[in-house]
Image (tube, helix red, strand yellow):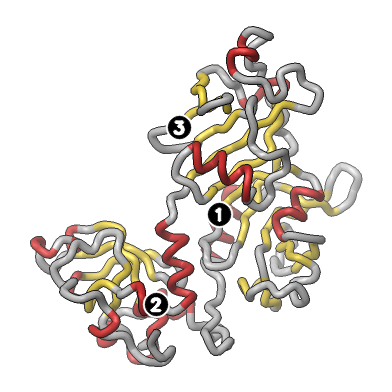
Amino acid sequence: MNNMNELLGKKHCEQHTEQQDYEGKLLIIKPEKLKEQYRNPIVQYFYATSGFGCKHVNGDKKVFGQFLADGLKEQLYRSDFIGVADKTQLPSWAAKRLEILETPKMKIRVFQLKIGSDNLFMNYDHTMSHGGIQAEKYMQVYGGEVLAGSLEEVFALGNTEQPPGYLGHSISVSDVIEVNEGKEKGFYFVDSFGFKKIEDFNIDKTDHAKMMKIIILENDRKPYMAEIRHDIHAMQSVVGGCIEPVYFEPKGDALCWCNDEFLLNGSAPNRKIGETLVHGTCYISGDSVNKYGEYDSCSLTDEQIERYKEMFPQSVICLDRTEDMAENESECLTQNMD
């Protein structure tokens, strides 16, 4: 691992990478391509996603991607890079973010039969011979982006490490999983073995009115929207304990919620929310007056979701000597190229 203040060079790259295809690779930007005040190894890591410049045969064309430190999207030229970063030399923060970045992700919803329903935990054949799949008997227990690349991986995740905000039993037979995008988009009944795609599952008939749209902020991961039930247990499952508000929005129409013992439970520093450096997973919800005249959590609007994703793009970087990244260092990534 290199010295944390040492600028990255050829020795930090894989050998003979100049002619490699850069797509899907972590690259190192040449120090001289950064403005002098921003020449820092943290800023040099860039993850390439597309562009004609990814292929050596196309010459000095553009490479599209994002800075690893804060996820800011940018377009550079192939000649701006030294080469492909050697993963064995990555600092711990970079290795963690690259691992999450390269992990497949799926946007899903999970529906489960209400307790007491006749076909609860029954397989597809039994269900179809006893009234069929009746959407009105289901309730939504989660919606969001999970670190999985297939329905099988979603099933495993739902039985081992349920995502923040999930409020239901482990994913089981009779559940319905909705895949929101991609080639597997659709609804799937969890059968005794595998999954059955179903065509006539109507979400509007399910118990989903109490779902609340929030932004979840995890360490080393970009913000993502999730749908959780408006229930204290779902809220506590996001932060891993009792919740406490952090006020940051001058308009007073949104709040950040964190674990009330984050300074005592060993959580890593996450994001600076208002004047507070929050540790551990937290989330942002809307805040409004309910029908009883009391302030209560509510769904974020689409405009708020996009605004807070931009406002809190990534967690702070904790260096190996336990010093946090300089307060404004991630902000410099927006204007670091000559």
Front residue (pair 305, 219): 219
Q: Residue at x 19, y 70 (%)?
A: 78
Q: Which of the 4 image quarters holds residue 98?
A: bottom left
Instruction: State left or right for residue 290 relative to residue 86.
Output: right
- Residue 335 percent across, percent down from the top left: 38, 78
Query: Disc 3 marks which residue?
Result: 185
Instruction: Report the number of discs.
Output: 3
Of the two numbered discs 2 and 1 in the rendering, the one whose residue sits closer to the viewer: 2
- Residue 324 percent across, percent down from the top left: 57, 84
Q: Residue furthest right?
A: 292
Q: Is residue 94 above or below residue 116?
A: below
**Could you say whether the residue bearing mark 3 is in a helix, strand or loop?**
loop
What is the quadrant of the C terminus in the image?
Answer: bottom left
Query: Disc 1 marks which residue?
Result: 224
Of the two numbered discs 3 and 2 in the rendering, the one whose residue sits closer to the viewer: 2
Q: Is residue 10 above or below residue 22?
A: below
Query: Disc 2 marks which residue?
Result: 90
Please, what is the three-letter code of the amino acid marked with disc 1?
Tyr
Label 1 environment density (alpha carbons within 10 Å; few <14, some 14–19, many ≥20): many
- Check whether the beta carbons of the residues at disc 3 and disc 2 lie within 8 A of each other: no
Q: Is residue 260 above or below residue 206?
A: below
Q: Residue at x 80, y 68 (%)?
A: 260
- Mark 2 to mark 1 CA distance (whole Å): 25 Å
Say whether disc 3 or disc 2 marks the residue closer to the N-terminus.
2
Please, what is the three-letter code of the amino acid marked with disc 2?
Leu
Q: Residue furthest front?
A: 193
